[in-house]
Image (cartoon, rainbow, N blue to C red):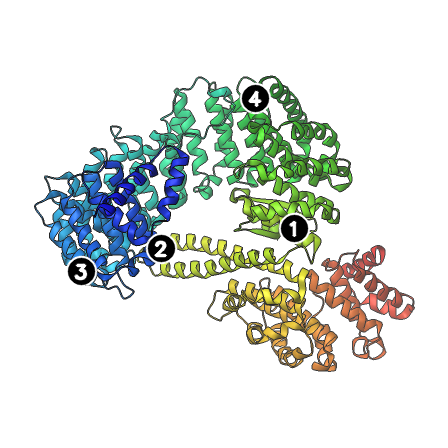
């Protein structure tokens, strides 16, 4: 016995040391604790918990450790204990709960019991601890208040404690909760039972029948929310927010009461800010999770809006505000920030049709208030609702803009700041229409505001608004202002550089550097004349701004230099390129010392991507140094994209995309929401620029995992949307938001397809074994029951497999060939187009294995081409891909089709003019046929030549072929050959319309 007591004594010392403030002592104690065997740990810990004579801290520590042990190492420790020890532990715990007098200690022991119960429910849902359940039932109706608390606490902590008996006990559970919620004498019991009710509902979030059964607990629950708030406890209110977020349906039978209560608490200035904001959060969350339900309660929405606006007026006077150099994050718990974010979310959730008419008058009144706080709040409110009320505000944008610009001259600096904020926000929310309509007024007003020397914060915010404006400004609109913009930005930069050296202030400089970058990015080559004005100062900043507080400035300057380089092009930038790379690599050698949150890292990575773009193959020398940190930063969930210009217009910067233009209508998009994306983007760029061999196995493994996760998520989201469509609150506005989600998902699918395209085109069939992990998911995309965009993009991916990986691709033909043949006649033109393109590349690149399928595909393609509406706007692209595919079959697999029979038809379908790539392919084949004097094409005695001339003329009129394409030369030569044979030439030209004759002339002149 004595030995055991001595050991237990040692253990108390150990518990004391685990709590020690001295790091060395604590570390050593942790190691000693880790090395105690599991069973001994449990014995020692229980002994310490039971010993009421021991120090309070030591007992609490022991309780925490025991719960941790059961939650993290249950399977290693518990099952290996002898049965009698297991039984002892169970009864011991229940005994200690009954003996414990101290409330917070009792809760900790209840946590242990709940953890044990959670682990003692077996796979079939049987509760292996029936005594625990009996204890719950006995305690909840005990006269002893401590025991009732204990029972509720255990149930709150683990609402699944009844396992597969839950349905059987449902009425008992309900009675138990109702009874406790009506306990008038003990507020703590009411609070706990309300929280337990919420936990139980949340644990059964998919059980709609249970919501109905428990609906009559709601009034009592809401009463508990109210009462606990006035006892300075917001735990029940937080439970209500969780319910609104996860199971809003549960609130439906008492929605009016829920909303009224939230509104009352939110408006009660006697409560603390946190509680008022939580009450508002209930309503705002419902506007996101149950918009259709909330729209039926317009009276509540109308009363919530003034509450949010009142919160936004709750601002502090601050003497130092105007020239503070650090942007402290606005206190996130301040009412003003909470009100603004709530308004933004509510406008997006409920839509502008409902919100704008309710808020318009309020904002107008606030803007006329003599107190600056109201004018500030009014302008911030206007910024906040722009996204949600987009359609409704567009109609009255003119008056809004004129009104807001007046406030850039308000006597109070914080109102001028808020006006900058509104202008910047509108420039983003309403781009590019905003820029097209208001460029003159807005640029002038912002440049003037940037001169506000006495107020740094206003200057910086005006520069920030200018960035938003230029980012989405069409180049042609910006060019006329370039001179004046550059002059202003340069003079401010020089001034602020001096201030940095003299006073160390940097706030405005950070924004101005980004404004310069943004102007260069939009102006592109037109920025060349100003290059030498800025570059020396910018390089100077990167070289010298090395102190920790200047990290952001340095990062933004690095970004600025690389954007200017990209804008002016390689020729102009080369004089500085190696200097800049050296500066970047110098930072890069200190890369390992950088803290993870160093803002420079993300700027560096984007800068490399741009440098790689500018330098092309010459970037290779830097790859070894760059790839290391890229992989370090790339523990990734990326979104990167190769886009054409149309795509870019649909994606605004507020989603955090950044674009690098690749020329030729293509851009490279980088999602800058997190670093991981940037490093991946940089790698994708390297794949494209460097081709095969720049990704190693590790990179591939990582990329595979990412793409797989994206696709799995895609299918999951689709299922969730189907469920929402079955919902009783489903209405057209819900459908609208589901459509938006759908578009986002499809958008990510297009990116997955882009990434695979760049990998297949670089690595060819070598990459197929890696691709197999994605194969089942891609096959799933082309199943007949999937929505058309899934089938379209799934086919595009298989098209790439055929085009870049043949003949090896035939190995997977069993997965895609049948669907591809079937989908040529699909009802969706996008799907038909993807299928037809695939059949074309199959003829062109597929090996001999594909021959029988070319024969089978031909009549299907012809059927599509000859259908009545084949040439309508929505069908033309699919039809042209079919025509092109038929041409490729005759050209590359002539023995699989009857060329003599098909050719005359094919000629009658020409020319193609919508799909430029396929047009070039068909014209090239046409030239092959003419140049080899093919009798069917030329016709007896060249009688077909006038028809061929009209095909060439039509192609030229539709700009189907660029004049610098070798194909244009071939066509011109065909025409010139006929020109030499007088009579035939006259005959051909005579049969053309005047427009066609002019087109032939144009071709001869330019090709």
Crowd band around label 2 with a 10 angstrom C-alpha radius: few (<14), some (14–19), many (20+): few
The number of numbered badges drawn on the structure is 4
Marks 4 and 1 close (CB-CB < 8 Å): no
Q: Secondary structure at mark 3?
A: helix
Marks 2 and 3 close (CB-CB < 8 Å): no
Which of disc 1 and disc 3 is earlier in sequence?
3
Q: Quadrant of residue 441?
A: top right
Which of disc 1 and disc 2 is earlier in sequence?
1
Crowd band around label 1 with a 10 angstrom C-alpha radius: few (<14), some (14–19), many (20+): many
Q: Which of 438 and 828 lies nearest the eye of the viewer?
A: 828
Q: Which mark is residue 505?
A: 4
The Cα atoms of the two marked residues, 4 and 3, are separated by: 69 Å
Q: Which of 858 and 1003 lies nearest the eye of the viewer?
A: 858
Q: Secondary structure at mark 2?
A: loop
| 130 displayed left or right of 277 | left
Which of disc 3 and disc 2 is earlier in sequence?
3
The Cα atoms of the two marked residues, 2 and 1, are separated by: 43 Å
The residue tagged 3 is 130
| 205 displayed left or right of 931 | left
Furthest-left residue in this view? 143
* Nearest-to-viewer mark from 4 and 3: 3
Which of disc 3 and disc 4 is earlier in sequence?
3
* Nearest-to-viewer mark from 3 and 1: 3
**Any part of residue 238 in sight:** no
Crowd band around label 3 with a 10 angstrom C-alpha radius: few (<14), some (14–19), many (20+): few
* Nearest-to-viewer mark from 2 and 1: 1
What x and y, as percent, mark residue 350?
Answer: 37, 45
The residue tagged 2 is 731
Marks 2 and 1 close (CB-CB < 8 Å): no
Give the residue at x 63% y 75%: 810
The Cα atoms of the two marked residues, 4 and 1, are separated by: 37 Å
Q: Secondary structure at mark 4?
A: loop
């Amino acid at each position: 016995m004595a030995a055991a007591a001595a050991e237990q004594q040692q253990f108390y010392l150990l518990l004391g040391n685990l709590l020690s403030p001295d790091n060395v002592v604590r570390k050593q104690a942790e190691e000693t604790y880790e090395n105690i065997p599991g069973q001994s740990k449990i014995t020692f810990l229980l002994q310490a918990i039971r010993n009421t004579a021991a120090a309070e801290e030591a007992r609490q520590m022991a309780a925490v450790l025991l719960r941790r042990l059961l939650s993290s190492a249950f399977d290693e420790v518990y099952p290996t204990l002898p049965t009698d020890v297991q039984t002892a532990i169970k009864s011991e715990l229940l005994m200690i709960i009954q003996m414990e007098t101290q409330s917070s200690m009792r809760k900790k022991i209840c946590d242990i019991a709940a953890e044990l119960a959670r682990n003692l429910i077996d796979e079939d849902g049987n509760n292996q601890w029936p005594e625990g359940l009996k204890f719950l039932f006995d305690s909840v109706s005990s006269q002893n208040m401590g025991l009732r608390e204990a029972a509720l606490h255990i149930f709150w902590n683990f609402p699944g404690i009844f396992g597969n008996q839950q349905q059987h006990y449902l009425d008992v559970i309900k009675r138990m909760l109702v009874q406790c919620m009506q306990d008038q004498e003990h507020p703590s019991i009411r609070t706990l039972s309300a929280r337990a009710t919420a936990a139980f509902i949340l644990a059964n979030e998919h059980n709609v029948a249970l919501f109905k059964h428990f609906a009559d607990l709601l009034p009592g629950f809401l009463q508990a929310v109210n009462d606990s708030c006035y006892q300075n406890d917001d735990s029940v209110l937080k439970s209500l927010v969780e319910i609104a977020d996860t199971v809003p349906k549960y609130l439906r039978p008492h929605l009016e009461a829920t909303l009224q209560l939230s509104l009352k608490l939110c408006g009660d200035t006697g409560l603390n800010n946190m509680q008022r904001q939580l009450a508002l959060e209930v309503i705002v969350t419902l506007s996101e999770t149950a918009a259709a339900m909330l729209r039926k309660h317009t009276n509540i929405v109308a009363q919530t809006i003034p509450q949010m606006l009142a919160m936004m007026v709750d601002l502090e006077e601050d003497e130092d505000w105007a020239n503070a150099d650090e942007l402290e994050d606005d206190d996130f718990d301040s009412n003003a920030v909470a009100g603004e974010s709530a308004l933004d979310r509510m406008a997006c959730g409920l839509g502008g049709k409902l919100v704008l008419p309710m808020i318009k008058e309020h904002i107008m009144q606030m803007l006329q208030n003599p107190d600056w706080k109201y004018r500030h709040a009014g302008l911030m409110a206007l910024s906040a609702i722009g996204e949600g009320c987009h359609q409704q505000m567009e109609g009255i944008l003119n008056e809004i803009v004129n009104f807001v610009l007046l406030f850039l001259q308000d006597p109070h600096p914080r109102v001028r700041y808020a006006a900058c904020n509104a202008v910047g926000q509108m420039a983003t929310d309403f781009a590019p229409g905003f820029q097209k309509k208001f460029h003159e007024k807005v640029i002038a007003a912002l440049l003037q505001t940037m001169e506000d020397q006495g107020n740094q914060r206003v200057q910086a915010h005006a520069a920030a608004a200018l960035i938003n404006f230029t980012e989405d400004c069409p180049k042609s609109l910006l060019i006329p202002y370039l001179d004046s913009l550059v002059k202003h930005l340069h003079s401010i930069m020089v001034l602020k550089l001096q201030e940095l050296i003299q006073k160390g202030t940097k706030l405005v400089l950070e924004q101005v550097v980004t404004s310069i970058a943004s102007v260069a990015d939009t102006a592109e080559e037109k920025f060349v004349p100003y290059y030498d004005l800025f570059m020396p100062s910018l390089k100077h900043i990167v070289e010298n701004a090395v102190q920790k507080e200047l990290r952001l400035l340095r990062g933004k300057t690095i970004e600025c230099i690389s954007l200017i380089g990209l804008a002016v092009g390689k020729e102009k930038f080369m004089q500085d390129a190696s200097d800049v790379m050296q500066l970047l690599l110098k930072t890069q050698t200190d890369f390992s010392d950088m803290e993870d949150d160093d803002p420079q890292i993300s700027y560096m990575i984007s800068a490399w991507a741009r440098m790689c773009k500018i330098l092309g193959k010459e970037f290779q020398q830097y790859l070894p140094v760059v790839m290391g940190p890229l992989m370090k930063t790339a523990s990734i969930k990326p979104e990167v994209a190769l886009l054409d210009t149309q795509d870019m217009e649909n994606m605004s910067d507020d989603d955090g995309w950044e674009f690098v233009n690749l020329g030729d209508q293509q851009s490279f998009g980088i999602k800058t929401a997190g670093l991981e994306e940037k490093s991946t983007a940089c790698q994708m760029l390297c794949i494209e620029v460097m081709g095969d061999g720049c990704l190693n196995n590790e990179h591939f493994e990582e990329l595979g995992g990412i793409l797989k996760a994206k696709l799995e998520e895609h299918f999951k989201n689709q299922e969730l949307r189907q469920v929402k469509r079955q919902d009783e609150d489903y209405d057209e506005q819900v459908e609208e938001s589901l459509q938006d989600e759908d578009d986002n998902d499809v958008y990510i699918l297009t990116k997955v397809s882009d990434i695979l395209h760049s990998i297949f085109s670089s690595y060819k069939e070598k990459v197929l074994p890696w691709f197999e992990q994605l194969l089942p998911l891609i096959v799933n995309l082309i199943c007949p029951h999937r929505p058309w965009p899934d089938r379209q993009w799934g086919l595009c991916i298989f098209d790439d497999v055929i085009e870049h990986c043949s003949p090896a691709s035939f190995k997977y033909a069993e997965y895609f060939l049948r669907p591809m043949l079937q989908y040529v006649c699909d009802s969706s033109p996008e799907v038909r187009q993807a299928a037809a393109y695939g059949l074309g590349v199959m003829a062109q690149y597929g090996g001999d294995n594909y021959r029988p399928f070319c024969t089978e595909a031909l009549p299907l393609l012809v059927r599509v081409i000859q259908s009545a509406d084949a040439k309508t706007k929505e069908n033309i692209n699919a039809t042209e891909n079919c025509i092109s595919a038929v041409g490729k079959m005759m050209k590359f697999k002539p023995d699989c089709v009857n060329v003599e029979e098909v050719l005359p038809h094919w000629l009658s379908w020409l020319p193609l003019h919508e799909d430029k790539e396929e047009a070039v392919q068909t014209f090239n084949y046409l030239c092959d046929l003419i140049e080899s004097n093919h009798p069917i094409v030329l016709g007896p005695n060249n009688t077909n030549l006038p028809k061929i001339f009209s095909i060439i003329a039509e192609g030229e009129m539709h700009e189907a072929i660029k004049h610098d394409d070798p194909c244009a030369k071939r066509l011109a030569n065909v025409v010139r050959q006929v020109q030499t044979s007088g009579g035939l030439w006259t005959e051909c030209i005579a049969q053309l319309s005047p427009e066609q004759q002019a087109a032939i002339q144009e071709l001869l002149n330019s090709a």
